[in-house]
């Protein structure tokens, strides 16, 4: 599929998705959101891809929904626009392949939500995060969901209620970011992490990643029982046989990617 609002590259076993609306700091309009969902589906179905890196072209990662488009839409159309982000975040949680956000510049509003919805976040030292909805009269309700799952109640409430901008080091401290790197090392660091993950057992990730997100919808006892049954099933896979055999034979496993 040809994409107009993003760039898709494939390097080794990594899919690199670049939001490509740099003139508006990669603001999310309907076309970009639709293409992002399609590119994730394409990469999920591509057996040569083991991990995905999401980044933004130009000066910033993403500054949220396109406000000009938003104000031109009817209420029903606005639901579709906001729903575009929600569909992507839901899909990331269901995907078997990890998605790593490489954040530079600003990640604000739904852009902050887009980063929080990714499985892992690598940020450059210049990165800044914000949920500024209270400053423009529209609370960041949809970004609130992945944000609160990443940083917990008190810090997410502080960000949401004040609209304060936080830097990369603070984002790392509160759990929104996994790693902060020098600006010129951002993409290499994200790709290195993606490559490391893509070399792991495909079967283990295929089962484990969706399971990780599934347990958030369960109470503690149900989650434990679900995990017990799933790990029993997973233990019968070819990758488990290969991995355990490799340990016993003191060699590296040879995964069938």
Image (tube, grey):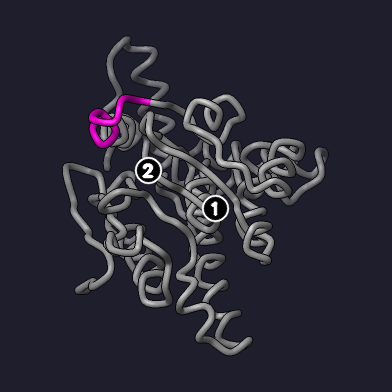
74 up-or-down from 141: above or below: below
Question: Which residues make up the magenta segment?
Answer: 181-188
Q: Mark 2 points at which residue?
A: 105
Q: Residue at x 68, y 45 (%)?
A: 148
Q: How crowded is mark 2: few (under 14 residues within 10 Å), some or many (20 or more)?
A: many
User: Measured from the top left, where is residue 67 in percent x and y?
Assistant: 49, 72
| SS for dot 1 | helix
Q: Is residue 141 above or below residue 251?
A: below
Magenta span contains residue 125: no
Which quadrant of the figure has residue 125? Answer: top left
Question: Residue at point 25% right, 28% down?
Answer: 185
Asked if residue 227 lies left or right of residue 21, the reply is: right
Q: Image quadrant of residue 109? A: bottom right
Helix, strand or loop at mark 2: loop
Task: Name the spot of residue 4 as percent of width and height, x first.
Answer: 23, 73
List x then y, in percent, for residue 95.
46, 54
The residues tagged by marks 1 and 2 sit, at their Cα atoms, a distance apart of 15 Å
Q: Quadrant of residue 39?
A: bottom left
Circle 1 sits on which residue? 113
Q: Residues within 10 Å of mark 1 (few under 14, many from 20)?
A: many
């Amino acid at each position: 599929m040809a994409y107009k609002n993003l760039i898709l590259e494939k390097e080794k076993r990594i899919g690199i998705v670049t939001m490509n609306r740099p003139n508006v700091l990669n603001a999310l309009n309907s076309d970009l959101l639709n293409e992002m969902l399609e590119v994730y589906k394409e990469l999920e179905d591509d057996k040569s891809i083991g991990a995905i890196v999401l980044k933004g072209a130009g000066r910033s990662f993403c500054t949220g929904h396109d406000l000009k488009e938003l104000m031109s839409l009817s209420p029903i159309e606005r639901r579709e626009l906001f729903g575009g982000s929600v569909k992507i975040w839901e899909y990331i949680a269901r995907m078997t392949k990890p998605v790593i956000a490489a954040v530079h510049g600003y990640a604000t509003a739904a852009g902050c939500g887009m980063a929080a919805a990714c499985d892992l976040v690598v940020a450059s030292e210049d990165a800044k995060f914000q949920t500024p909805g209270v400053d423009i009269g529209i609370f960041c309700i949809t970004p609130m969901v992945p944000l609160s799952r990443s940083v917990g109640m008190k810090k997410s409430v502080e960000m949401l209620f004040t609209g304060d901008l936080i830097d990369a080091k603070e984002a790392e401290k509160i759990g929104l970011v996994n790693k902060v790197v020098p600006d010129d090392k951002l993409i290499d660091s994200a790709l290195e992490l993606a490559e490391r993950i893509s070399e792991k057992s495909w079967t283990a990730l295929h089962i484990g990643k969706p399971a990780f997100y599934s347990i958030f919808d369960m109470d503690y006892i149900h989650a434990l029982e679900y995990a017990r049954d799933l790990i029993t099933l997973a233990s019968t896979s070819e990758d488990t046989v290969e991995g355990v055999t490799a340990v016993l034979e003191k060699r590296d496993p040879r995964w069938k990617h």
